[in-house]
């Protein structure tokens, strides 16, 4: 099945909508799993290339895996080159060409990516993820589906949660065809674009939420977040900047003596719940596309 046929069939795929996910009685439990599982894959020493995570780098990693899965030596348009990567990442709007250049170089240096010669044209270098990157991608994929498993355990998302390699390939091919829908989802959440783009900002605020940071009686202090800085490969000043922007945007308030206590507002909870629900809905769509892709390949004997 080609990417074009996948795109044509997206509208016919039944999948959970953001509204259905938000209304699900188990959504609070799914949110907790979403936060805890993503924290694991974004931690320092786990996230590839020893960088902190942001939307630009996460998107770049996903696209590298997708383009590698869709590589067809006979189709020059599918060759996973640096130019093809930059053109695709540009559609998402989260990373500059310079950032991609430095990130790719670091991925090669740290053993997550290899540059291989294209057999049909020795002037071309292909971006090939190593098993180290593919293993991280399977963990990242499983982090999304662990949350969906909480909501819809029957029949569940076993191939993704069990990090099945064949499913990973089908998932990557299907995700590439769903990029436009994913981009639309991300940019429909304009209030949180800064927190997607800033290194580790999203996971730090989500971690604060899981610490009880939205409780009106919260007694969390800024100093209590110090441990999050090394955990997510950022500085303490970067954490302070994230909190300052959150306060400017009415996502966070301070209270108590000398404004010592910090608390996330209901406005923040609403905005980030909407983003999480949108992300899970896109994951569910991609999962259904991947299952169909596998079924059609099996039926054709491919």
Image (tube, rainbow, N blue to C red):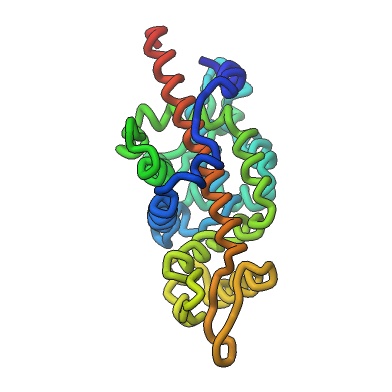
What residue is drawn where x is 54% and y is 86%? 260
178 with respect to 296 (left or right): right
17 with respect to 245 (left or right): left
What residue is drawn where x is 57% and y is 83%? 255
Total labels: the figure holds 0
Q: Which of 46 and 171 lies nearest the eye of the viewer?
A: 171
246 with respect to 144 (left or right): right
Residue 189 place in picture, x, y as percent = 65, 50
Residue 177 place in picture, x, y as percent = 58, 27
Relative to 97, residue 80 above or below: above
Relative to 43, residue 239 above or below: below
Relative to 163, residue 106 above or below: below
Residue 69 place in picture, x, y as percent = 48, 28
Residue 85 place in picture, x, y as percent = 61, 37
293 with respect to 78 (left or right): left
Relative to 87, residue 222 above or below: below
What residue is drawn where x is 62% and y is 34%? 181
What residue is drawn where x is 44% and y is 79%? 224
Can the viewer see residue 140 in this picture? Answer: no
Q: Which of 163 and 156 lies nearest the eye of the viewer?
A: 156
Seen as rendered, the residue at the extreme bottom is 257
- Quadrant location of the C terminus in the rendered image: top left
Q: Quadrant of residue 270?
A: bottom right
Can the viewer see residue 215 in this picture? Answer: yes
């Amino acid at each position: 099945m080609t990417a074009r046929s996948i795109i044509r069939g997206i509208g016919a795929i039944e999948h959970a909508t953001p509204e259905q996910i938000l209304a699900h009685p188990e959504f609070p439990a799914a949110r907790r799993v979403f936060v805890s599982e993503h924290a694991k894959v974004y931690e320092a020493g786990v996230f590839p290339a020893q960088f902190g995570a942001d939307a630009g780098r996460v998107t770049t990693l996903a696209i590298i895996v997708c383009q590698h899965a869709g590589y067809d030596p006979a189709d020059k348009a599918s060759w996973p080159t640096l130019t093809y990567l930059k053109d695709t990442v540009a559609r998402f709007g989260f990373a500059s060409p310079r950032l991609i250049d430095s990130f790719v170089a670091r991925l090669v240096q740290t053993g997550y990516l290899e540059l291989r010669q294209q057999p049909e044209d020795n002037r071309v270098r292909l971006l090939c993820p190593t098993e180290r990157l593919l293993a991280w991608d399977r963990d990242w994929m499983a982090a999304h589906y662990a949350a969906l498993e909480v909501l819809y355990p029957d029949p569940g998302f076993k191939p993704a949660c069990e990090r099945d390699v064949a499913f990973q390939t089908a998932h990557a091919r299907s995700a590439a065809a769903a990029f436009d829908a994913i981009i639309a989802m991300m940019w429909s959440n304009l209030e949180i674009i800064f927190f997607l783009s800033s290194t580790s900002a999203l996971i730090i605020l989500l971690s604060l939420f899981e610490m009880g940071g939205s409780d009106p009686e919260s007694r969390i202090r800024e100093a209590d977040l110090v441990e999050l800085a090394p955990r997510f490969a950022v500085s303490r000043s970067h954490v302070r900047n994230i909190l300052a922007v959150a306060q400017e945007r009415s996502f966070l308030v301070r209270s108590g003596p000398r404004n010592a206590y910090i608390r996330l507002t209901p406005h923040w909870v609403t905005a980030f719940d909407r983003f999480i629900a949108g992300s899970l809905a896109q994951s569910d769509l991609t999962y259904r596309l991947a299952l169909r892709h596998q079924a059609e390949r099996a039926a054709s004997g491919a």
